[in-house]
Image: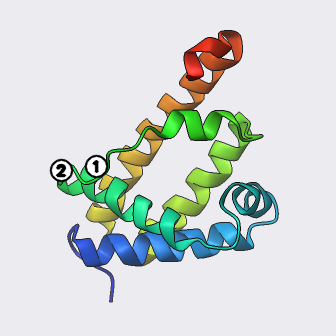
Amino acid sequence: MPWDKVSEEGIVELVDTFYGKIRQDPELGPIFEEAIGDDWQPHLTKMYDFWSSIMLTTGRYKGRPLPAHVRLPIEPRHFGLWLELFTETTEEVFEPETAHAFQVKAHQIAGSFMSALDTVKQFPSMAR
């Protein structure tokens, strides 16, 4: 039964389900596999903290995601694929209102990343 509100348990289910799909995706999977390697648990744990901080304002996430992503061979179309899988997963894991709240945040994050990555391509010293 889908979660009707944001909770730590729902975030874990979302992250685990979403990254299971990412790993199976023929385009996104290899990018993530190359960056993460064989041990996905540290990344998943970081994503639990990230979404907990975003959606529940727990402040658990302390990372700087942009420098890690600048090194990856990602393009705007990858963000579109990422958003499609994320939207699909939120709709499976949560009731519509809660899924929509995650989707709004994901679109904001993707927009920010695309803009930042474009800026870094123009000014590489900003990635440090």
Residue 24, picture quadrant: bottom right
- Image coords of residue 25 (percent x, y): 74, 67
Q: Is residue 99 left or right of residue 56?
A: right
User: Residue at position x 19%, y 56% from top?
Assistant: 56
Residue farthest top in this picture: 123
Q: Residue at x 28, y 63 (%)?
A: 98
Amino acid type for the residue under numbered disc 2: Thr
Q: Which residue is mark 2?
A: 57
Name which residue lies at 70% across and 18% down. Answer: 121
Q: CA distance from mark 1 to mark 2?
A: 6 Å
Residue 54 badge: 1
The quadrant of the picture occupied by the C terminus is top right
**Residue 16 in view (yes/no):** yes
Other-residue count near label 1 (Cα within 10 Å), few / some / many at <14 / 14–19 / ≥20: some
Coordinates of residue 114 in the picture (x, y in percent): 59, 30
Q: Is residue 125 left or right of residue 92?
A: right
Q: Of helix, strand and loop, which one carries label 2?
A: loop
Q: Classify mark 2: residues with Cα within 10 Å, few (<14), some (14-19) or many (20+).
A: few
Looking at the image, can residue 94 be seen? Answer: no
- Residue 35's quadrant in the figure? bottom right
**Residues at circles 1 and 2 in contact by the CB criterion of under 8 Å:** yes
Q: Classify 86 as above or below 2.
A: above
Q: Residue at x 69, y 70 (%)?
A: 23
Q: Is residue 59 above or below residue 115?
A: below
Image coordinates of residue 13 in percent, x first then y, are 40, 78
